[in-house]
Image (cartoon, grey):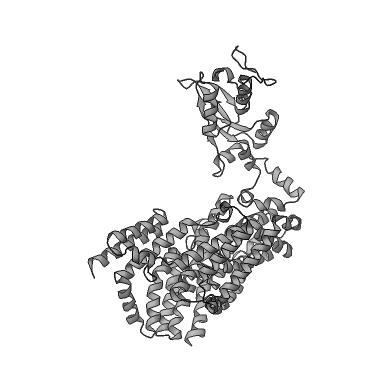
Amino acid sequence: MRASDLAEQIPTVTRETDALEAARLIAEHRLASLVVADGNGLPVAVIPGTQVLKLVVPRYVREDPALAHVYDEAGADEICAALRGRTVAALLDADDVRTLALPSVLPDDTLVEIAAVMVDRHSPVVVVRDREGRYSGAITFARTMAAIAAAAGEPVDGFHDGSDGTAA
Amino acid sequence: MSLQATLAIAVFVAAYIFIATERIPRVAASLGGAALMVVIGATGAEEAFFAEETGIDWNVIFLLLGMMIIVSVLRQTGLFEFLAIWAAKRARAEPFRVMVMLVLITALASALLDNVTTVLLVAPVTLLVCERLGINPIPYLLAEVMASNIGGTATLIGDPPNIIIASRANLSFNDFVVNLAPIVVILLVVYIGMCRVMFAKSFKYDAARAQRVMALHERDAITNPTLLWRSLLVLTLVLVGFVLHSALHVEPSIVAMLGAGVLVAVSRLTSDSYLADVEWETLVFFAGLFIMVGSLVNVGVIEQLGTAATDAVGDRYLLAATGLLFGSAVLSGVVDNIPYVATMSPLVAGLVAAGGGNPQANALWWALALGADLGGNATAVGASANVVVTGIAARNGHPISFWEFTKYGMIVTAVTVTLAWPYLWLRYYL
């Protein structure tokens, strides 16, 4: 399988996306990370899922995790409600949030090359671009693992590569 | 003056300017200066590493290292989070009473631990309490960091300048407590009154919001009670060791390192955990600083300055103490008080030695300590703890400008240093 067979269109957010909308997107699509697109809709960065949680956990609790234990249930719910009114930009601008520049692979790269880039860049998503920089889709960690399992003779339910022109 | 002495002064002044302006990291300035001192022949391996008078003061380095390790373990227990929330609840979440409790906790903790560590531990829980109360945390953070600098003045281990003074002057833990703790207690009482006036607009009480503080579960902050009790036991033994170190003929650095070793053994934490709060950069900074100052001693600069100072002072020790107190306060507000005290210590040692055991000459050490420690409150860069707190505040969306800090810092410094003068006068010079 090649990268072009695995590339698909994935849900993205922008800097201006409301944090609640981003949370809904992650939950509905069971995403492991949040892919941020630029003004033209092209993915430019990825925020790993655990980093997205920093939208909820106050900075002082992140700096002193023992404080997370002192809230009662109502207090914890209040903290979560603070998600309302915030945007993805708050994450992108926070100096303690690890945002990754989105790594790319070539359309004819193999599964090993795709996996190597993910490992090397600690990224759960790679984009597929040709040598001219034209974007043709993205490959998630889950889809890569499904492809690896299929290549090893253990097909995964619901996985279908796009080598016949239709991506699942 | 020899060419070598002139070169040594030039290297020292250049390094000092870099440290003060932070144009390059202070560790680089300190080590770079030390390296240049070696290059010009002002010091060598023997003088830098093995000479007590002209080399790295290992007592200071290892006392700091030991206390840093103890704090690394202690902070994993949740003790400070527990204490701060417990105190806020004891104050019934009334804002001024909360501030008083936090100020007292910070001052006491700063007397027993490093100031930077103390504010690192207290600031996050302060932000939480203020968020629950729906009030601006900036006055509370300012009140705490200034209380930290005042409280740290009281003991040998409370503030790094005191550690340097103790080592250079051969003063004991009890000497500091007996001579500085009384005035620190007075200053804290006055300071709390000042907080009431300076931050008068920050004490709006809201019963519903206060209830949100009363609902916090402070006991849940303590995640490892066994570690807490073990840490408290070792910390108590270390403090007893400090009190008895003169009688036992054991240096405070040995007490701290023994305490750190025992705590590491009984805590069963990984090295990542118990070394987490060790500020290696600070320790290396100190080492470079000691080599630079030792080089000035080697080439005779300190002796010449000491002679000039002794001639100028004569037996007018009250005048010298006044100059040291206020001069140190002003300079410590502008430059970090650690390099300042490291530089001044050999000079003051010369004055004290010339006094031949005169108690009025000995008291110059207390003038230096009070001036340098209290002067750290004057500006946002006067003490390391100030820098840490303004950083925490900014990261949490409550930036404190340099001038906002300085506005309050100048008032607090002026009042505390001015009050320290009659204390010195009445106690040592009347």
Q: Can the viewer see residue A131?
A: yes
Q: Quick one: which residue is furthest to the top in this view?
A: A164
Q: Give the image location of residue B17, x and y in percent.
A: 36, 60
* Number of numbered markers: 0
Q: Quadrant of residue A41?
A: top right
Which residue is more in the foreground, A93 or B222? B222
**Looking at the rendering, in which quadrant would you find the N terminus of chain A?**
top right
Q: Give the image location of residue B391, x and y in percent.
A: 53, 54
Q: Quadrant of residue B332?
A: bottom left
The answer to whether B126 appears left or right of B214 in the picture is left
The answer to whether B251 appears left or right of B75 in the picture is left
Which residue is more in the foreground, B257 or A67? B257
Tell me the residue at 32%/63% (across/down).
Answer: B44
Q: Quick one: which residue is furthest to the bottom in this view?
A: B430
Q: Is residue A144 above or below residue B42?
A: above
Q: Give the image location of residue A147, x and y in percent.
A: 61, 22
Q: Can the viewer see residue B195?
A: no
Q: Give the image location of residue B361, x and y in percent.
A: 43, 83
Which residue is more in the foreground, A106 or B413? A106
Q: Is residue B319 above or below residue B67?
A: below
**Looking at the rendering, in which quadrant would you find the C terminus of chain A?**
top right
Tell me the residue at 35%/84% (across/down).
Answer: B314
The answer to whether B203 appears left or right of B337 in the picture is right
Tell me the residue at 73%/47% (across/down).
Answer: A76
